[in-house]
Structure formats: C-alpha cells, structure tokens
Amino acid sequence: MDLNTVIGAALAFILVLGAMAIGPGGVMVFVHVPSMIIVFGGTTAVIMLAFPTADLKPVMKIMLISAVRKSSTPTEEIDRIVDFANLARKEGLLALETKLQTVDDPFFGKGVQLVIDGFSADTVRDIMELEAEWEDSRHSTGRKIVDQLGAFMPAFGMIGTLVGLVQMLQDLSDPNGIGLGMATALLTTLYGAMGANMVFIPVAGKLEMVAKTNQQLRKLMIEGIVAIQSGEKPQLIKEKLKGFLSPPMRALVDAES
C-alpha cells in the first residue's frame, strides 16, 4: 500500500475538519443539505451525462487500486526477470511454469505463460504490447472521469453560490431569508472546493503519475520476457534492462551486483 496517499488524504481532512470543529458552532455549522444536493447531486448527474455507464462502473475501483496500491519498482522487476531468465537457461522454458504461482501481476504472468506455450518472440511482443495499450486505454478513461469530477465540483459550487445569492436578494427585509441564502451561497462554494482540491484533483494527479510509471514497467517487462523467450543470457538481459533506469538507480544496481 502507498502510505503517502492514505496519510495525505487523512491529514488534509483532519486539518480542515479540526479547524471547523474548534471554531464557533463546531462542524455542524458547515452541514447544509441543500448545498450538498446542489454540489454532490449535480456533479453526479453531469458525470452520468458525460460518460457511458460501462465506463463509470469501474471508476471507483480504478481510483482505489491505482491511487493506493504501491507499484513495484523497475529494479524489482529487473531482479524478477533475471531470476526467471536464470531458471529458463538452466532448466528450460517449461520450468518457468513452477514459478508462475508466485506471480501476482496478471500482465507479467500472461507474458510468461505465452513463453511457456511456445509462441515466437515477435508474437509474444505483439500480444503484450496490445495488452499494455488496452490496459492504458481503460485506465485513461478512469483518469479522465476523475479529472472531470475535479472540474465539475467547483462549477456546481459556483452555481450554488448564484442560487444562494438569488435567494438572499429576493427579500432583503427578512433576516432569516438572508441567512439561508448566504449559507447556500458560501457552503456550496466550500463543498465544491473541498471535494475538488482534497479528493479528485490530487487523485487525478496521482493516477497520472501511476500511469506513467506503469507504462515504463510494462515496456520493461515486455523487453525482459521477449529476451527470455529468445534465450539471451541473464547478464545480457540485465544490462539491456538497465537502460530503463535513471543514472542513480543504475549505479545502485551496479553496486548490488
């Protein structure tokens, strides 16, 4: 689990809600059902309008898995590929089947299985590149939905502000009406800003970074698995895959060798 995501989200809410709680009236002053309906209900409605149901269903899963799950590092993947290459060189490609039980990444597991099944290097590359492309496409749709959520929430906060101002200006002689309208005007803006800046915009940024890292790992896996299928020496595979590493990480791998 990526603890930075969990700690960051929890800290943001604790700080904001804590500041509300110690102020006059406590947290309940900031609870306003009409404002919630405008911001959260309106945002949900336009997201349903903007995207097909089939794309909306997995978005929460994508948010949770991609934002919270800690990805493996390139050095870890290189070590795993070299380990598989050593086994294949000593005992043959069919021996890799015994290690498939330890693979928790479906993408890597599928690539190894293609090698075990005897497909050519070109075929393995083509299938895995297509798989990686479609995986990124699916995740890209999820990132776009989260990004749009971050854009729509402040917009509905502004709509709520306008609604509240209209209500307030209907009858300036009624103090109760002025207070109700002002509450709607201010709290819708607050809800929109909190939802966008404390949840959806940070998650969208995190998903973008995760996607870039994942793309690099997929390319590294493809090159490594194809090299195993081609029967290249483990040390040569390691040297080839070090091209995916930054100079400091490359130096660290060299130091560990």
Image (cartoon, rainbow, N blue to C red):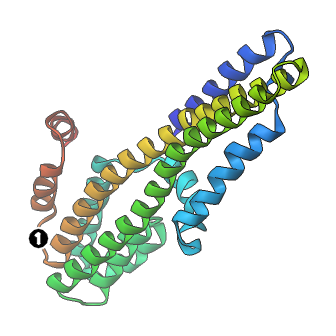
Q: Can residue 20 be seen in the rendering of this structure?
A: yes
Q: Nearer the viewer, residue 185 or 95?
A: 185
Q: Quadrant of the N terminus?
A: top right
Q: Which residue is mark 1?
A: 232
Identified at 54% across, 43% down, the residue is 200
Which of the 4 quarters of the picture holds residue 241?
A: bottom left
Number of marks drawn: 1
Q: Amino acid at mark 1?
A: Glu
Question: Where does residue 190 sit, x and y in percent of width and height?
Answer: 65, 28
Question: Where does residue 56 sit, x and y in percent of width and height?
Answer: 57, 66
Question: Where does residue 72 sit, x and y in percent of width and height?
Answer: 39, 50
Residue 29 higher or lower than 150, as above or below: above
- Is 164 left, or right, of 202 in this rendering? right
Q: Quadrant of the C terminus?
A: top left
Question: Could you say whether the residue bearing mark 1 is in a helix, strand or loop?
Answer: loop
Residue 241 higher or lower than 27, as above or below: below
- Is 80 left, or right, of 207 in this rendering? left
Residue that sits furthest to the bottom in the current view: 118
Which of the 4 quarters of the picture holds residue 225?
A: bottom left
Q: Residues within 10 Å of mark 1 (few under 14, many from 20)?
A: some
Residue 61 higher or lower than 196, as above or below: below
Q: Nearer the viewer, residue 44 or 130?
A: 44
Question: Where does residue 79 sit, x and y in percent of width and height?
Answer: 28, 54
Residue 188 higher or lower than 242, as above or below: above
Identified at 88% across, 17% down, the residue is 175
Identified at 28% across, 49% down, the residue is 74
Which of the 4 quarters of the picture holds residue 235?
A: bottom left
Q: Can residue 6 be seen in the rendering of this structure?
A: no
Q: Nearer the viewer, residue 242 or 183?
A: 183
- Is 115 left, or right, of 162 in this rendering? left
